[in-house]
Amino acid sequence: MIHEQMSGETQGAPLSHDAAQGDGAHNSSEAAKGAEEARPQAHEEGAASPAEQPAASAALEEPAPAELPEVYEISLGLIADADRRGKTRSLSEEFYASGRRDKAASVIGRALGEENDFSLHYLGSFCLKTLPAAGDREAQAEFLTGLMRGYSRCGVLMFTTDAVKAFAVYPPSRGSAWKAVPDGAARAAKGERVYKGDAVVFIPFPYGTRFTVDLTAKNGANVKMWKILPGSSVVRNWQGGVWEKEITVVGAVK
């Protein structure tokens, strides 16, 4: 069996982008100024003078709110307090419109965390019920990475199981393996820490936790694993095939 450890933190793919500005904007401004000065000053007969022309009010209007993707909308709908939901929506739309998808998800995560006392069970249930609205597993991991920036005090281990023959998750003592939380359970019983979805598994954990995942793979697709913490993520990708691995998960940023 191969032993690996998920501890070193590497920043995941960015969820936002900043538009770069170069000298082109300055040159365009100078060119526009020159063109303006070169225009004839005389007005055609009957044409309105600048003072008489209507104000270009459309240019001064506030931009329309960003249209949020489905997973954002569903997540916002889970915020129980109407006032908190409205304020969170405004912030999320503002961040999303500016290209900060990570921050747009983060403010939702903060609101949900505060309302639900940053519950691990709530987080696991959210991953199963709401996260699929984001799209494929890559899109789910991207949204969850942003959400976890606000849903602090804990992390989530996520891995695909399309080509996993068997797996088991153990606490540091290597005693009894953690069990799966029954679908639709109101709370997780002692020893129930695993949330099984459609060919994907989520394991929420308190910040600073160490645990072990034993994986047995079969021929098929690659096996991908994400360890997501507030503000950081580690990603592992193993080729499909017949193999066994023991992965130690260190739930903290060094």
Image (cartoon, helix red, strand yellow):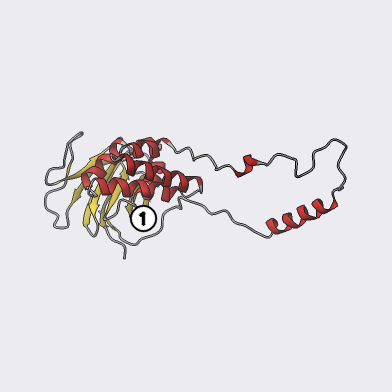
Q: Is residue 68 above or below residue 169?
A: above
Image point (23%, 52%), residue name = 205
Image point (70%, 56%), residue name = 24
Mark 1: secondary structure: strand
- Across and down, in percent, residue 162 comes to 33, 38
Q: Quadrant of the C terminus?
A: bottom left
Image point (73%, 58%), residue name = 27
Q: Is residue 135 above or below residue 106?
A: above
Residue furthest out toward the bottom: 254
Q: Where on the picture, by quarter, is residue 136?
A: top left
Using the rendered image of the protein, determine whether residue 253 is visible from the camera's viewpoint: yes
Going by the numbered disc 1, the residue's amino acid type is Val
User: Considering depth in this image, is 241 or 50 the residue closer to the camera?
Assistant: 50
So how many labels did they put on this image? 1
- Disc 1 crowd rating (10 Å Cα; few below 14, some 14-19, many 20+) is some
- Across and down, in percent, residue 113 comes to 27, 48
Tell me if 156 is positioned left or right of 52 in this view.
Answer: left
User: Considering depth in this image, is 35 or 4 the residue closer to the camera?
Assistant: 35
- Across and down, in percent, residue 182 comes to 17, 36
Image point (37%, 35%), residue name = 133
Residue furthest out toward the front: 52
User: Considering depth in this image, is 131 or 251 the residue closer to the camera?
Assistant: 131
- Across and down, in percent, residue 250 comes to 26, 59
Using the rendered image of the protein, determine whether residue 238 is visible from the camera's viewpoint: no
Task: Identify residue for label 1.
Answer: 234
